[in-house]
Amino acid sequence: MDDDQKGLLYLFERPFEPLKIPRAGGTILFQQEGEEDEDLATLFGSSGTTMMNVPSRPNILSKLPKCMGIPRGVPLSTFDPDHRAATKELTDLLMDPVALPQLTSHAASIKDNMNEALFIYALSFAIISNPAFDSRLVPSIVEVFPSKFIPQETIQLAMDEVKSIQFKNPENVPEEIVVPHNVDIEPTGSSQNPEFPLAYWREDYGLNSHHWHWHLVFSNNDRDRKGEIFSYMHNQMMARYDWERLSNSLDRVVSLNKWREPIPEGYFPKLTIDNSSRHYGNRPDNMIPQVFQVFALRPNYVDDMERFTERFSDAFQKGYMIHENGENVPISDNVAPGEQRGIDIVGNAFEPNEGSVNIGFYGWLHGMGHVMVAGIHDPFGHHRGDQGVIGDPATACRDPAFYRWHKFVDDVFQEYKMQQVPYEDKELVFEAVEVESVAVKSGTLEENVLETGWDIRTIEASRGLDFFTQRPIKFELQHLTHRPFAYNIQVTNNQTDPVDVTVRLYMAPKVNEAGEPMTFMDQRLLWAEMDKYQTTLQPGSNTLERLSTDSSITIAEEMTFRDLEENPPEAGDPKADYCGCGWPQHLLIPKGKAEGMDFQILALISDWEEDKGQIQGVRNCLMATASRGSLGLTSTGYKFMKISSSKQLNPILINPSIRNNSSSNRNDTIFKEMVTVKSLVELIK
């Protein structure tokens, strides 16, 4: 690892500590100009220490008045307008440097004066978004802020263990201390809580990291079709959440659309902020949103939310939104190539972002819901309570209310979509190509059976927290996983020449809560994209094989601090294109049931010539699929969003069953060996 990458990397280590504290086990020391203290290195480490000199920039903080208004030691909420404005102010500053030493210098000179989460957010954005730093990577957010992912009780046990070892045998402290996963001490609820069975999914480190990265990559910038991508990404997350609910014999999620009534679902996250004793706010069951006086909100908060919602509905009925200059802005998805789709305009206004046509008139509904629930336990700020986890993009997915709120969000977008002209048959059929059959196969399992279980991910929490030792402190995080599988698609190209095509693979549950086959309209919003890729079909019969691990929807694990220290990717290495906003590979399929749970997989093939037009992302990983910022010319989710009848699809479906192969004791870990495959299937017309 070169010195430039090294200097940048260690700005992420223990973000709550002052810059002058040595990093990397005492081997890296940042020295502010005029504040040199060479004795510090020997206090914190005995090995050779590399000095990183930081020029003094006395006037730089005067350029950051909004940032200076966000205190250190509080969670960052990019859903709150003040926090969002501060992130834009800081990201704008850090996007200026065109060389890595300059970026490191800028960042180091302001670090100790910035809110810790704000600093990491803006620095990460600059590295990922600035083309000058294409081959540079940020370490795993789980290691940077482990207290956002690991319950306080587990962290405290690790600290107690370190103290015990150092007291009993200070001369023989192990090289590293690994804290094993313990199901018994980590739950955030009990069997008395009807939402608790889904804690393993909501609190998954990969899911919450994905959400943080997505809002990072799509924060204050003008990415093409950002509003449309916002709508689609959350729609896909909601489909997968309902998969998981059905896997646990729960009803599908209900919209949080009545803001003057109690919210039945409480949530006690049991997370602290860094090494402090400050906790994310707890929300008891059945709390009612009240008048808010925090976040500088007006006292008629719920009134405003209701009024803004009515204005969106009115716009959908009329077919236009009102620009802040008073002009009518048509909203339709039937537009000429290159024109902005209505869903993009609606998404920009609803999130909202800088692309909103009229933020004063349509408000910031998406963010308002997050803030409302995050502050519900202390709406007047009388108790100086910190916000709930739903206010922080890195923790929001943990809260059951997040999904109820986003069901409301998705319902608003569906209200818009239902006003659009349905697809014509010719838009849905590629006459030159016929899908003959689809199959999935996983190792030695029978055809069309997929298997899930539990596995462990180890993270080095001492990179983000102080455990009062220079030894690495690692934690095992248990997560859902599945055996890899492969798709086998038999396709006929009826043309005499090769043809370039787009292959899309979707999955949805086959039956509803009562075990009855779902109607098309019931199932329409439960189709989630499993993969999307481009290939060439030769004339005649073709066999397409695709591994689940190659899915363009998903991403590999984030690189840890140690990965970047010991084996950093070189420029040109695909790993160097990592941006983190794809779906976690280990959550590609739902848990299923021990007896098996029936799903359907749908293969759709379209003409690449009509679908191409990829939007160039800053990093290649943004180019794979809509939820990660890359779209073809077609609308996101286009096969399901404007279809009035299932007959329009003439689908080729298979019916795989997903079987959860684990005992009730989640301490059982399986799937240490992963296998790959191929196969064939039942054809349903």
Image: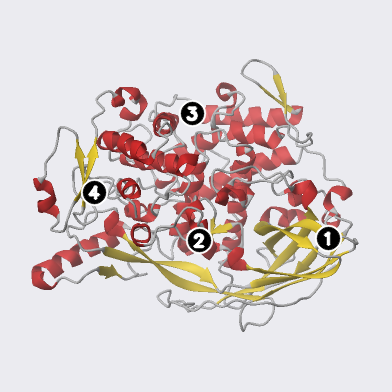
- Residue at which label 4 appears: 277
**Distance between mark 1 and mark 2 Cα atoms:** 32 Å
Q: Quick check: 98 left or right of 214?
A: left
Of circles 1 and 4, the one toward us is 1
Q: Quadrant of residue 441?
A: bottom right
Earlier sequence position, callout 1 versus callout 2: 1
Is label 1 in a helix, a strand or a loop?
A: loop
State how far apart marks 1 and 4 are (Cα). Answer: 64 Å
Mark nearest the camera among 1 and 2 is 1
The label shown at residue 301 is 3
Q: Is residue 669 above or below residue 80?
A: below
Please determine whether, in this image, residue 235 is positioned above or below residue 221. Answer: below
Q: Amino acid at mark 2?
A: Ala
Q: Which residue is mark 2?
A: 556
Q: Position of residue 399 (x, y in %)?
A: 46, 51
Structural crowding at the residue carrying mark 3, measured as other residues with C-alpha within 10 Å and reported as few (<14), some (14–19) or many (≥20): some
Of the numbered discs 3 and 1, the one sitting upstream in the chain is 3
Whichever of labels 1 and 4 marks the residue nearer the N terminus, that label is 4
Marks 3 and 2 in Cβ contact (< 8 Å) = no
Image position of 239 with respect to 472: above or below: above
Q: Mark 3 vs mark 4: which is more N-terminal?
A: 4
Q: Nearer the viewer, residue 294 or 157?
A: 157
Instruction: Tell me the mark number nearer the camera, choosing from 2 and 4.
Output: 2
Task: State how far apart marks 3 and 1 are (Cα).
Answer: 59 Å
Residue type, label 4: Ser
**Residue 67 sits in which quadrant?**
top left
